[in-house]
Amino acid sequence: VSYSSQKSMLPKMKMIPIPEKAYGSFFEGDCYIILYNKKTSNGFITDLHYWIGKDSSQDEQGAAAFYITQIDDMLGGSPVQHREVEGHESEAFKSYFKSGIIYKKGGVASGFRHVETNMYNIRRLLHVKGKKHVSATEVELSWDSFNKDDVFLLDLGKVLIQWNGPDCNIAEKSRGLALARSIRDDERGGRAQIGIIDNEKDSPDLMQIMNTVLGERRGALGVGIPDEKADELQKANVRLYHVYEKDNNLVVQEIATRPLTQDLLQHEDCHILDQGGFKIYVWRGKDSSKEEKKAAFSRAVSFIQAKGYPATTNVEVVNDGAESAMFKQLFKRWTEKEETQGLGKVCTTSKIAKVEQVKFDVSQLHARPELAAEQRMVDDASGKVEVWRIEDLHMQPVDPRTYGQFYGGDCYLVLYTYLISGRTHYIIYMWQGRHASVDEITACAFNAVELDKKYGNEPVQVRVTMGREPQHFLAIFKGSLIIYERGTSRAQNNEPEPLVRLFQVRGTDEFNTKTIEVPARASSLNSNDVFLLTTNQVCYLWCGKGCSGDEREMAKIVANIVSKRDKQTVLEGQEPVEFWAALGGKAPYASDKRFQESTVRYEPRLFECSNQTGRFIMTEVVGFCQDDLDEDDVMLLDTWEEIFLWIGKTSNTYEKNEAVSSAKDYLKTHPAGRDLTTPIIMVKQGYEPLTFTGWFSAWDPYKWSRTSPAYKPHFNSNVNSSSNYQNNNAPSVVSAVTNGNGAYPREVLINKTVDELPEGVDPAKKEYYLSDADFHDIFGKSKNEFYQMPRWKQQNEKKQHGLF
């Protein structure tokens, strides 16, 4: 819901509801309030934004802030509140307007009705910017406004001409086209033509119109000005302040810097969290005074002024107990009471580092990709496993009888091969021992690249640091994953094997069991687990009071691998003298009962990565979907437990080569002080595993795996004649203008097999190649309306009309 604050004195100002078809259009002389509700498994999450146009008055800005406080009170203080300034909106705000944001000159009082009644008497030039979330600013109607890096839209009411700069990319052109279609369908009721200029020499008719309106161009086109973006180092510089008034003065007291902990937030206070000047958060304690809560925005603005930050700095106000996901992820750890286990909610851990083992039905993985993502399982682990050790910087095959045994002084490559729907998939795990040399770690990465090439660059690559093995890695070794702290499995190993070793066994079945060597002393024991103590005479199975029968059974299997000696089961509290003697004597160890608390499982976050400018910059895509993965991108998906790097087919070589470095930089600079050993998984376009696709709400597995080369829209353009330019009733323009890929007659698309289709047509999107007129005639709706429908509805309608 959008509302605009009408121009007048504060007491008389009203909120005027905005019609839905005008959502995304903002007058620069006005202020707006946006209420956004998102349904979750626990109810609704509400966000309140007030938007400030660059030409709005102080009275309007004050009224917007006043009304947002009133709405917040009416909703019980649960909404997250945001202050947005034109041209500097948050990624969350931009995500609400899928077709883009348009900034219009003037204000509601002066221009709104005029535009409504004279929608065809328009002459404006829109400067379109952005790859993921698009914004369009009305600029001077002149060639001087153009540059060669961006997209520009000349809006003449009955005709929209999209001019693509020679140096703009495919994604920017696609988003520009989506915006043009949105204007045509929403503002003009479909009664406007779209023309596209991708190469001026190929579009003489459209260029003639452009020159008639703008005059002849003199001089060369300039270079576009890049958007100022905060780099990750800047965003990592988080500081927490206690802000209060004393003797009518604002007092700002710094409390802490990164990494922040949740206990720093006092319920009786209000705090400001400064994210390096990139964004300001105000946290309102539940026991703070009503006056303090009401003063949140004004204090944030005063803080921004005192710090000398730009007036456009984004502000977010969060309430104690209703914090946003963005706020929580700035803290090293965030816990909440009375949360339950579930996908995207919380997981339970104990203070003594025991994770609750969750059983799941592997047969559901392919039917429910979100389960595969949650459990980190691409399949049921029944595929083929091959293991190599890095030796003298080359790959040396490991004896299959010792598969699952990894030594901290080595690096290993594990190739996992599995089938899904008859298609072969590959995963390359790069396991790096804690005590391996730098040369071996480098050689491991190099050999992984060579192995990747051998399999057609299809494998998913996973960097695994010793001790941080992902769930699927455990599962493929069927409960026999054993990690030795030091040493090597090489034949010429000269190190003597320790006489006494202690292993901690964690897991309840063959999918989740891992055994790690720990220091052979009593303080390493834990009452909640099973331990194996090996000596030159016997192997003790020590069972803590808190362990389960399943854990004991798994430990018995592992015991036969780590020791050929006789096995002796020992219950906690009934240890023989020889047991303690082997550990060097008794000592205190973790023996508390399992204590459960809820730890927030962070929502996955998608970022576009860039470090070409020498500054590491991440641009977040809020409310992401598969369409946000552009072929020329390198994208980072953070699921907290692992980092995915998605490599587009046409992404540039520099960013491909620097992808892993980018992921490491992301972890290093994360405000929450992330674990640098977090697994990094490299995924290539078209070969995404379920553990990746499951984080997306609707994934089309056939989008990129076609018989034709990777789909790239061609932006040809054409306006048939001046008569077409005058034809208001034509529902669309010429074929190449409507879909950006060239339209085909319906006869060559309907009820045709893949082999019968014209070359280059995507067989899964036949309808996309219809002209707008044919599309509307067949489906009874515009393409824009069709693609907003749920995917299952699209498929059903395509089947009905022979286009599936």
Image (cartoon, rainbow, N blue to C red):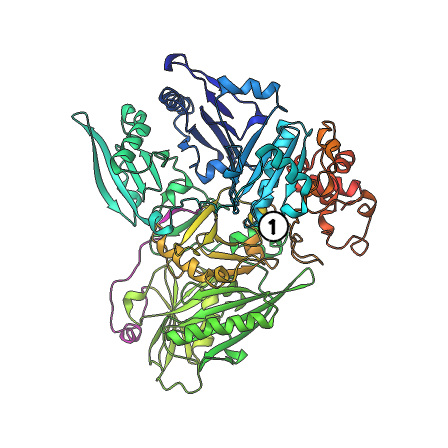
**Is the residue 126 above or below the residue 507 in the image?**
above
Q: So how many labels did they put on this image?
A: 1
**Nearest the camera: 29 or 667?**
29
**Nearest the camera: 334 or 545?**
334
Does the magenta segment cover residue 584?
yes
**Is the residue 731 above or below the residue 58 in the image?**
below
Does the magenta segment cover residue 702?
no
User: Residue 337 in the image: x percent, y percent?
Assistant: 38, 40
Q: Amino acid at mark 1?
A: Arg
Query: Position of 249 compared to 129: left or right?
Result: left
Residue found 54% across the figure and 36% down from its top: 100
* Residue 132 visible to an observer of this rendering: yes
Q: Main secondary structure of the magenta part?
A: loop
Which residue sits furthest left? Answer: 247
Residue found 27% across the figure and 29% down from its top: 288
Residue found 42% across the figure and 63% down from its top: 468
Q: Quadrant of residue 433?
A: bottom left
* Residue 81 visible to an observer of this rendering: no
User: Residue 143 in the image: x percent, y percent?
Assistant: 53, 38
Query: Position of 201 compared to 753: left or right?
Result: left
| Residue segment shown in magenta | 573-602
**Nearest the camera: 306 or 778?**
306
**Nearest the camera: 706 or 36?**
706
Residue found 37% across the figure and 48% down from its top: 596
The residue wearing badge 1 is 368
User: Residue 729 in the image: x percent, y percent?
Assistant: 74, 27
**Is the residue 198 above or below the residue 540 in the image?**
above
Q: Quadrant of residue 705?
A: bottom right
